[in-house]
Amino acid sequence: SAVISQKPSRDICQRGTSLTIQCQVDSQVTMMFWYRQQPGQSLTLIATANQGSEATYESGFVIDKFPISRPNLTFSTLTVSNMSPEDSSIYLCSVGKGLAASETQYFGPGTRLLVL
Amino acid sequence: GENVEQHPSTLSVQEGDSAVIKCTYSDSASNYFPWYKQELGKGPQLIIDIRSNVGEKKDQRIAVTLNKTAKHFSLHITETQPEDSAVYFCAASTGFQKLVFGTGTRLLVSP
């Protein structure tokens, strides 16, 4: 398994501002992902964080709104830009240690964001 | 793209009873099916997973079955305990480790 931490654990932000969320893993991993979980809803993949290159975004998510960095094999950040109340969600990072299509994926504790 | 449906949305059982949650998927190319348990205020925790070359997998009180022909898979929890109360999510992997999640089942186990 993997031990994953996220910072901050929660935040309350004003609309129009930006928040950067950090994800730290206790060991090197191949794959890192960012998910969004809207209140009372399921998880939706935002993007795959690629080490040393631009993230790969899913349909409906764009780099200008959710810029992602992954400078090394244990760390990634997700920024939620120009926030609106609709961005209030739990943001989760997950990791896969290998490259197999059926690799086990582990999730961090999440960052709970409320936008006023 | 892949679509995963999950039923029921809520499930209430008495302690000691069994609980079954069912999921169906649409993409026959999906080959990995994990189940996650999410407790209030926490991230999803992997509880069991199954790959497409296996029909059934068991881990103590938890089992998962997969029917590739019908494109459905199920989670079975036996001898339920109050600490099993949580939201359970099924998921299917469409490749490159991308997970598509079901809508979740809120399980409540009453003492």
Image: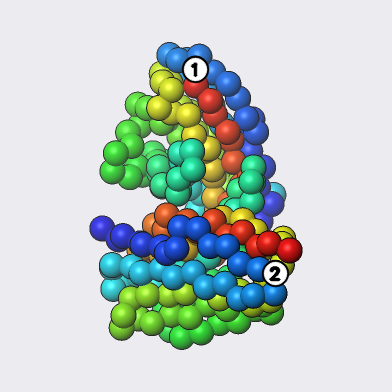
Q: Mark 2 lies on which chain?
A: B
Q: Quadrant of residue A105?
A: bottom right
- At horizontal 49% and vertical 69% (from top left) the residue drawn is B21
Residues marked 2 and 1, same chain: no
Q: Which amino acid does label 2 sit on?
A: Glu
Left or right? Give the position of B69 relative to A31: left
Residue A91 drawn at (x, y percent): 52, 38
Callout 1 secondary element:
loop
Residue A58 drawn at (x, y percent): 33, 45
Q: Name the residue under label 2.
A: B15
Callout 2 secondary element:
loop
Asked whether the residues under the numbered discs 2 and 1 touch, taking CB atoms below 8 Å apart as contact, a structural biologist would say no
The quadrant the C terminus of chain B occupies is: bottom right
Label drawn at residue A116: 1
The quadrant the N terminus of chain B occupies is: bottom left
**Badge 1, how many Cα within 10 Å: few under 14, some, many 20+?**
some
Residue B74 drawn at (x, y percent): 47, 74
Q: In which quarter of the image is residue A85?
A: top left
Q: Which amino acid does label 1 sit on?
A: Leu
Label drawn at residue B13: none
